[in-house]
Structures are given as structure tokens and as C-alpha cells.
Amino acid sequence: MPAPNMFIVYVSDAPAAARFYGDLFDMAPSFETPGFVAFDIGGGVQFALWSRSEVALAEVGVRTGEVCLAVKGAPESVDELFADWKGKGVRVVSEPQDEVFGRTFVVADPDGNLIRVAPVD
């Protein structure tokens, strides 16, 4: 049975979003066009950003998904990453807090897509 191997996030400007995510996650694109940028994230899986002019992002209702970065060394690593990202000026949605699965926080990209940092399970 095939498994998902690409996760796509809709953005208003793929190259600008690629710069944002590339800086945040310290990675470089593996594929780039003016409207679609992909990053190899390991194991044959890609994280992609797609500019869709026919999707009015501001008019889209509640977003129910998140990009999640699971980090080792929590809770200290979560707090350190939060301080680093906050220093880069990202929009904070949820300050670091302890949840049932451990220390976590949420920020948003320029289009309002949510990015959660949490400990490795």
C-alpha cells in the first residue's frame, strides 16, 4: 500500500514562503518553480509550498492542519527554538506550554499556516 510522500502547504507566494521556511528550518529547496517549491525532508518525503492564485487564503475558514517539527532534548530544546524563532520575528500563536505530550508552542507563517514545535514521541 502506498504511503503519503509529500505534504503541501498553500501559500500566496511560494518563493517568499520558501525563504521563510528555509530560514526557519535551515534547509534548501530541492525543486523550485515560480509557483511551487519543494524541500526533501528525508526518507523520500517532501514538504512543498504551492502558490494557488485561485485559492483566496484570507477567505479560507478555520485551518485544521499544522506543520509539526518534533525536536529531541525537550523541554529545553523547545524553549531554545522558541527564543530563536521569536528573535526572527515570527508571529507567535501559542507561547511554550506543557501539554499531555510535552513542551510545545505554535507560530504562524506569513499566510497564517500553523507550525508547531513539540518533543519527539
Image (cartoon, rainbow, N blue to C red):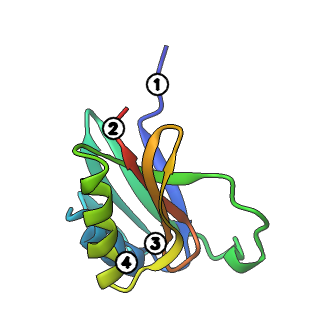
Residue 69 vertical position relative to residue 10 in the rendered view, above or below: above
Q: Is residue 116 something one can see in this rendering? A: no
For discs 3 and 1, the disc positioned in front in the rendered view: 1
Q: Which residue is mark 1?
A: 3
Sort mark 1 into few (<14), some (14-19) or many (20+) by Cα contacts within 10 Å: few
Give how far across and how far down residue 12 sits, in percent.
55, 78
Up/down of 98 relative to 24, above or below: above
Query: How many residues crowd around disc 2 within 10 Å: few (fewer than 14), some, or many (20 or more)?
Result: few
Image position of 76 with respect to 17: above or below: above
> Residue 15: which disc?
4
**Res. 57 mark:** none
Q: Point out the tag, 3 or 2, that comes first from the N-terminus.
A: 3
Q: Secondary structure at mark 3?
A: loop
Between marks 4 and 1, how big is the CA–CA gap? 27 Å
Tell me which residue sits at (29%, 69%) in the image: 24
Comparing labels 3 and 2, the label whose residue is closer to the camera: 2
| Left or right of residue 71, residue 67 in this image | right
Q: Earlier in the sequence, mark 4 or mark 2?
A: 4
**Residue matched to label 3:** 35
Q: Amino acid at mark 1?
A: Ala
Instruction: Pick whichever, 120 or 44, lies toward us.
Output: 120
Q: Quadrant of the C terminus?
A: top left
Residue kind at label 2, given as amino acid type = Val
